[in-house]
Image (tube, helix red, strand yellow):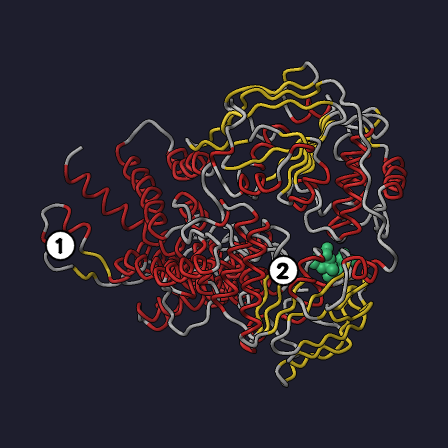
């Protein structure tokens, strides 16, 4: 394996991890406040759809990203209303939202563009080479010549970590996920906080979907998230519910996916379908190993009821 | 300062408050008394906005308070220490204190908060480590954290819902001191406790609830324990229980050099003692000194890392809980809500938890449902469990009645050895009396009992021999006739020279 191959693999890892990372950070917000982020897949797909359509219609990639966040948030608010306000089961509602978005996006795509789904060709966002860092030989250009949205994904971890550990609002959000009765007795409204967390998480997941559609693939296709939301969910757990851990988790899964893509071109005598299973097998293996010591937020999945 | 009128609240079909009036003036400490389930906590939760009232009006500091939540209550100047702690176990003491603390900065100030916690706990002798995780703290310490939280938050009217059930005598003294200081600053306090001595010592007035209504109000001057108890129960309290002398039977339990080390921390220093049939070994000590570890090692929930336990000639050191149960061991854990009851399950199912897999409760792999109900009725009668039926969820019963279910299940099996850990915790005087009576009856019937408690009074009432637990070590048990109360007190407080350890 030569240096170019490693550089190539690194670039692919970063590229594949970025949408995962947005989704994982969004899911982290929701789970920290006590709601399983099962619906993250649907929120991602909603973001991919609204992002691709609006970028195509308005011919503006930035606007595409903005509306993708909105689409993810709108999907999130549906979920938030059902689970936090109406106390619907989080798992079932999350899965329902995933199926709903899958169907709705395919339906709208055909409705908007006639009988057959059109192939949307998009111009990916321009790159922003970082001064100095991008000059590093071999690795510099692949790692530090990215679009603004990629830097945003990785930089987002800093304010998110600060938010969760150093601010009152972050402490309150965590308290709601651990013991909503205690948060309520301390003067907060756990239902409202959970709803806000889910909607904000939905916006991030929507951005993740838009990165996938606008940057990685360059078009929207039916069900294009294809399980990435669940991989993001696994990354949250592997990263033990911390933003920095989520980066690590996403990079691991991104790397395996990158390896899988490259391995296909190496012509190994293995079916490509088997190769495509790799990230999911890894997710299972890691979760089985990690979950023994991992600790979920204590009140996750438990609705808050006021007497 | 506070005026509550005609407060009503029903949980489903249970009428918890049926038209209660309560007045509290500034600079006054009002005691709120009543049996388990009489509606004290409900009334206070209504006041603090944790639950919403069905009817009635509240005026606080001459302003109406209605449809409020805790946020509005706190803004109006109310503070509350809840009977069931409102602490986040996965967070540190400091984080819990910062949660909901007044202030306008969006940023947390952990260092400043920690130093304030240290300062306050030093002032009031509460001994709290701000960096400790709540989940690692025993009940008594969590109670202190709640107290510090309330003090730091400050309030014009402070509601204390059974803050002393988990405290040792010196800590209770400390808390009463804090309350007196707050009163002298012109604040008001509503104090709930089942310990009538405390109420008489600190309150100026008491309000007694019975079945969700006010049964009476009186000034504390001149009130006696017996008089207050009569108001609570509606009849005279039975006389104190006489303990019969029993001939000590044969040795049934022998613990030899049992020790427990977890994650490199020594939880129990080697402990040795033996217990005879018809004998009560009472273990005194401040909560969190290894009592839970000792009880759980004996009951089989944890495995000791050294030494052995012998029950009636069987080595049970590594035996499972089921095997111990077969051999006649019974256990009343300290935490009834999580350890002894499945609160979402019915009374009859909870009563059957220990032996549902054997006839007559099950036949050929099927549960004999009809017998469940029959037995529940019989047990409810024998142990005076007040429940509207055998199929009602244990969760909806008052604390006292929940504990009676545990007692019925454990004592009803005529165990050879019973471990009772704070079995009267949070129970009203009537229920306490009942539990102690049942334990003495078991002793008279030849049961061997280990009774763990932080209350000196209980330990002295019950113990044939008395030992003290401190820092994971058990002192040599002393005969009740030769016991020296001051010495026990000193040992509980940690005077090392007196605990030679049962290792000797
Ligand atoms: N969440 C609830 N759901 C159903 N019933 C409840 C609930 N909380 C309390 N109750 C019932 O309301 C009644 C009053 O309960 P409350 O907790 O106010 O009693 P208490 O006087 O505080 O008793 P204790 O001394 O045991 O703390 C009891 O019969 C109890 O079973
Ligand atoms: Mg109560």
Residue B252 location (% of width, % of height):
71, 20
Helix, strand or loop for disc 1: helix
Q: Quadrant of ligand 1?
A: bottom right
- Do discs 2 and 1 share a chain? yes
Decide which of A87, B86 is in the foreground and name it.
B86
| Label 2 sits on residue | A87
In the displayed structure image, the side of residue A13 where residue B55 appears, left or right: right
The span from disc 2 to disc 1 (Cα, nearest Å) is: 50 Å
In the displayed structure image, the side of residue B380 where residue B298 appears, left or right: left
Helix, strand or loop for disc 2: loop
Q: Crowding near pointer 2: few (<14 within 10 Å), some, many (20+)?
A: some
In the displayed structure image, the side of residue A141 where residue B75 appears, left or right: right
Instruction: Say above or below: A125 vs A4.
Output: below
Tag in front: 2 or 1:
2
Q: Quadrant of the C terminus of chain A?
A: bottom right
Q: Is residue A44 visible?
A: no
Instruction: Say above or below: B58 vs B497.
Output: below
Residue A134 numbered tag: 1
Q: Is residue B345 visible?
A: yes
The chain ID associated with circle 1 is A
Residue B338 location (% of width, % of height):
64, 44
Determine the residue located farthest toward the top in the rendered image. B313
Residue B78 location (% of width, % of height):
58, 73
Q: Quadrant of residue B326?
A: top right
The chain ID associated with circle 2 is A
Q: Earlier in the sequence, mark 2 or mark 1?
A: 2
Decide which of B469, A267 is in the foreground and name it.
B469
């Amino acid at each position: 394996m030569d240096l170019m191959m490693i550089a190539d693999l690194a670039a692919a890892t970063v590229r594949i991890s970025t949408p995962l990372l947005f989704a994982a950070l969004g899911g982290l917000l929701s789970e920290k406040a006590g709601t399983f982020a099962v619906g993250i897949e649907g929120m991602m797909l909603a973001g991919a759809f609204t992002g691709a359509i609006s970028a195509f219609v308005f011919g503006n990639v930035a606007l595409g990203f903005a509306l993708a966040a909105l689409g993810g948030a709108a999907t999130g608010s549906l979920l938030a209303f059902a689970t936090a306000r109406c106390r619907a089961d989080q798992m079932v509602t999350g899965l329902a939202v995933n199926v709903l978005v899958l169907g709705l996006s395919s339906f709208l795509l055909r409705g908007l563009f006639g009988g057959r789904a059109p192939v949307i060709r998009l111009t990916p966002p321009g790159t922003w080479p970082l001064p100095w860092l991008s000059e590093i030989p071999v690795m510099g250009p692949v790692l530090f010549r990215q679009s603004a949205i990629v830097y945003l994904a990785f930089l987002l971890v800093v304010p998110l970590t600060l938010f969760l550990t150093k601010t009152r609002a972050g402490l309150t959000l965590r308290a709601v996920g651990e013991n909503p009765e205690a948060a309520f007795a301390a003067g907060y409204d756990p239902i409202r906080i959970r709803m806000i967390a889910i909607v904000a998480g939905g916006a991030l997941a929507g951005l993740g979907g838009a990165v996938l559609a606008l940057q990685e693939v360059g078009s929207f296709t039916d069900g294009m998230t294809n399980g990435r939301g669940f991989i993001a969910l696994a990354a949250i757990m592997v990263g033990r519910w911390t933003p920095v851990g989520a980066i690590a988790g996403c990079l691991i899964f991104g790397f395996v996916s990158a390896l899988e893509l490259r391995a296909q071109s190496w012509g190994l005598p293995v079916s490509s379908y088997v190769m495509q299973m790799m990230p999911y097998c890894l997710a299972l293996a890691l979760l089985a190993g990690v979950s023994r010591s991992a600790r979920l937020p204590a009140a996750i999945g438990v609705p808050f009821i006021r007497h | 300062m506070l005026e509550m009128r005609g407060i009503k609240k029903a949980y489903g079909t249970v009428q918890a408050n049926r038209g209660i009036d309560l007045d509290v003036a500034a600079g006054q400490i009002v005691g709120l008394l009543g049996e388990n389930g009489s509606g004290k906590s409900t009334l206070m939760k209504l006041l603090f906005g944790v639950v919403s009232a069905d009817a009635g009006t509240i005026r606080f500091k001459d302003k109406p308070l209605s449809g409020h939540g805790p946020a509005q209550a706190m803004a109006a100047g109310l503070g509350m220490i809840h009977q069931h702690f409102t602490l986040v176990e996965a967070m540190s003491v400091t984080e819990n204190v910062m949660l909901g603390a007044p202030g306008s900065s969006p940023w947390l100030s952990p260092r400043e908060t920690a130093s304030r916690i240290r300062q306050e706990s030093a002032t009031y002798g509460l001994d709290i480590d701000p960096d400790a995780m709540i989940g690692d703290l025993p009940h008594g310490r969590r109670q202190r954290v709640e107290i510090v939280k309330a003090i730091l938050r400050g309030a014009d009217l402070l509601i204390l819902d059974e803050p002393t059930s988990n405290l040792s005598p010196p800590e209770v003294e400390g808390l009463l001191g804090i309350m007196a200081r707050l009163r002298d600053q012109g604040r008001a306090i509503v104090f709930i406790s089942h310990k009538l001595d405390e109420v008489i010592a600190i309150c100026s007035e008491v309000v007694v609830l019975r079945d969700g209504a006010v049964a009476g109000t009186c000034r504390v001057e001149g009130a006696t324990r017996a008089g207050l108890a009569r108001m609570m129960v509606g009849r005279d309290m039975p006389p104190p229980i006489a303990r019969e002398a029993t001939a000590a039977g044969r040795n049934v339990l022998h613990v030899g050099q049992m020790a427990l080390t977890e994650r490199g921390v020594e939880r129990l220093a080697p402990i040795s003692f033996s217990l005879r049939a018809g004998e009560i070994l009472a273990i005194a000590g401040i909560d969190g000194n290894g009592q839970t570890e000792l009880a759980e090692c004996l009951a089989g929930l944890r495995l000791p890392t050294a030494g052995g336990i012998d029950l009636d000639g069987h080595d049970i050191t590594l035996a499972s809980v089921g095997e111990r149960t077969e051999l006649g061991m019974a256990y009343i854990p300290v935490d009834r809500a999580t350890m002894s009851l499945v609160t979402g399950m019915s009374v009859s199912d909870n009563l059957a938890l220990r032996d549902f897999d054997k006839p007559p409760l099950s036949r050929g792999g099927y549960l004999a449902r009809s017998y469940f109900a029959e037995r529940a009725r019989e047990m409810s009668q024998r142990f005076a469990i007040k429940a509207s039926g055998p199929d009602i969820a244990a969760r909806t019963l008052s604390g006292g009645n929940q504990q009676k279910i545990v007692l019925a299940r454990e004592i009803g099996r005529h165990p050879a050895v019973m471990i009772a850990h704070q079995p009267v915790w949070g129970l009203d005087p009537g229920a306490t009396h009942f539990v102690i009576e049942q334990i003495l009856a078991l002793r008279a019937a030849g049961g061997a009992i280990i009774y763990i408690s932080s209350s000196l009074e209980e330990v002295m009432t019950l113990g044939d021999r008395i030992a003290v637990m401190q820092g994971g070590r058990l002192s040599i048990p002393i005969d009740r006739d030769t016991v020296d109360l001051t010495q026990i007190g000193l040992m509980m407080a940690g005077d090392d020279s007196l605990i030679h350890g049962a290792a000797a």
